[in-house]
Image (spheres, coloured by chain):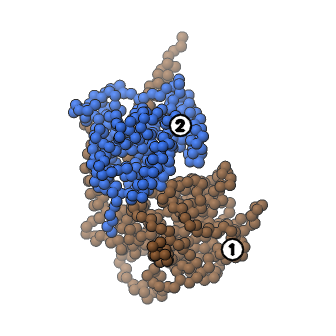
Chain colours: A blue, B brown
Amino acid sequence: MSHQYNFAYLDEQSKKMIRRTMLKAIAIPGFQVPFGGREMPLPYGWGTGGIQLTAAILGKTDTLKVIDQGSDDTVNAISIKTFFKTTADIAVTESTKDATIIQTRHRIPETPLRKGQIIVFQVPIPEPLQFIEPRRRETAKMHAYQEYGAMYVKLYEDIATYGRIATAFDYPVQVNHRYIMSPSPIPKYDNPKLNQSPAIHFFGAGREKRIYAVPPFTDVKSLDFEDHPFELESWNEPCSICGSTISFLDEIITDDEGTRLFICSDTEYCQKRSQGVGS
Amino acid sequence: MYVAVKGGEKAVKQSRRLVEKMRRGPETISPIRTNQIEHQMGLGVDRVMAEGSLYDQKAAATALKQAQGDTMEAIFLVRAFRTTLKRFGTSAPIDTQHMQIIRRISGIYKDIPGGQVLGPTYDYTHRLIDFDSDEKKEAPLKNQVSKVDSADQEISPQQMTRVIDILRQQGLMDISSPMSPQENVEDLTREPLKLPASRSIRLQNLARGDEGFLLGAAYSLQRGFGLDRHPFLGELRVGYITVKYTPPELGFEIIVGKIKITECFMINRFDGSENKSPGFENGYGLVFGQSERKAMSMSLLDRSLQNTSGQSNSDVKNSYPAQDQEFILSHSDNVESSGFVQHLKLPHYVDFQSELVFIRNLKREHNKKKENSLEPSI
């Protein structure tokens, strides 16, 4: 059975519905807008939310970059890039600077985003309160009444037990002084990049069927306490390839004895630096 | 030395080649044809159509072949195909009273108007594996079975009153509640699930939900996790029914196809309350193809979710999972659950790196504290 697929896979009606939802999400920063998420030929949990958003906004002149865990070359990033190359025949790039749309899983590139760029995050669990209150009916109320006491109690309990807030990634933020939002499972190291960023940030959760957004130049604050301010993770050594001391580093085990070395998680940034171009 | 992970593209290509090879198997064996699957593994095809939410035997059979017989993978393929199809309208509600019955049984009456029709079922077979089945000569079946039931054959559908309507006539069952088809039917495949969900959305969710999940949940009800007494099978019927649709440009009804369905009514005793007289309550199930296990599980869950949907009393605490709308409806879809459980195969080095940094700091402090406490106090 032969079947002709539309540009970027989804039919135009579905794309329009998704774009409308995205506009609503932009209008209410940090608020999770439900949408009629479609099944995609990739499995749930593998980026179907992000793919739907990218498909909905992709135009023929766009240049797409796809990263997974910071890397352009991991299997899922390749698979998604190939999907759009096949269904939409658009230009793809590894360069953060040259991309008009960046789809990402679990990272924000080290190269600062600029005005006009759109970054699309793949989101597994859009509800920041999910593990405090699993029931959607309850969390919807908590957001509506801005009743975030339970979240602060959890953070306080962390400090009482561990001396610090025990969330290392998917660290909750408050957007535009209103909604508490999951930044998706990016390391908390990336959280400050969302604050007052000139780019547009879209978050798509396919299985949970929700879309939310951080518009350009919006305040995004990582939750903390006056006496326990938000802290970033840091490394004692630089990247062993490019020598960067300011990027997020992955740990690589090099032998059975557990010898470790550290390299940039953002492969494109690392490559550019070691070639002596760009930042 | 192991350097940063590169070469994903090549690896994926090789993997595709390998799976192609695994699927084909040894070339000395002739490849299976999709029409063989369609006709000789019909129940498997039925399940893929039901949970794939698409009545298309050819697509389901092809998906099963492509997925090496992995049912959920096949369902996923059908869903991904379905999602690209345009929804062009809403058919007229099917009238199961007029279906072409191939099987129809009731567990509550020895005889019913129209009779009990056993039809094709494994229910009363002995489950012995026939290891000689390959060697057996094809016996001409036509002489053994007087009337072959299939969609191709024109058996004029005769009216068979539903058992539930008999109970309604006797005043044993609430007649005010049969669902009347609305003008605009909600569509779970176009709208996100909202809770509490209407009955039509709940039924849509259950109809495409995972058979195993529904079965387990229904079983838990039967074992006392939500039911306090034995339920009854009011009626189970399997057969063919025509689907009618009025295209706006034509303005009159046309037949768009014939589908095989399984319909089920499950009945529970209700002892009455202040404003409701005693009688029976029903749960309803309807599934594509012949899928009795699924239709029955669906009926049991439909009834248990009706009683606890909590529209009037939303703070009511549902004590068991199979009574809890959100628990059942949010976890029934196997395309969703299979994807998310298996996403753990994707790399998580960034997240894990953050955990490593955190745990090392914690460990350092823990050890420091321990050292301090071990220092002799003079």
In the rendered image of this protein, does residue A226 appear above or below residue B147? above
In the rendered image of this protein, does residue A233 appear above or below residue B18? above
Q: How many numbered marks are there?
A: 2
Q: CA distance from mark 1 to mark 2?
A: 54 Å
Whether residue A104 can be seen here = no
| Apparent side of residue A185 relative to residue B323 in the rendered image (left or right) | left
Residue for point 58% across, 38% down? A146
| Apparent side of residue A68 relative to residue B306 in the rendered image (left or right) | left
Quadrant assignment for the N terminus of chain B = top left
Kind of residue at badge 2: Arg
Q: Nearer the viewer, residue A70 or B67?
A: A70
- Quarter location, residue A104: top left
Nearer to us: label 1 or label 2: 2
Q: Nearer the viewer, residue B225 or A264?
A: A264
Residue for point 45% across, 84% down? B153
Q: Residues within 10 Å of mark 1 (few under 14, many from 20)?
A: some
Local SS, label 1: helix
Q: Position of residue B366 (x, y in %)?
A: 48, 26
Residue B168 marker: 1
| Apparent side of residue B205 relative to residue B132 in the rendered image (left or right) | right
Residue A178 marker: 2
Q: Chain of mark 2?
A: A
Q: Position of residue B53 (x, y in %)?
A: 46, 65
Whether residue A219 can be seen here = yes
Q: Position of residue B376 (x, y in %)?
A: 51, 15
In the rendered image of this protein, does residue B280 appear above or below residue B16? below
Kind of residue at badge 1: Arg
Residue for point 34% across, 48% down? A76
Q: Position of residue A14 (x, y in %)?
A: 42, 57
Q: Nearer the viewer, residue A139 or B246?
A: B246
Residue for point 54% across, 32% down? A155
Q: Residue furthest toward the left? A: A275
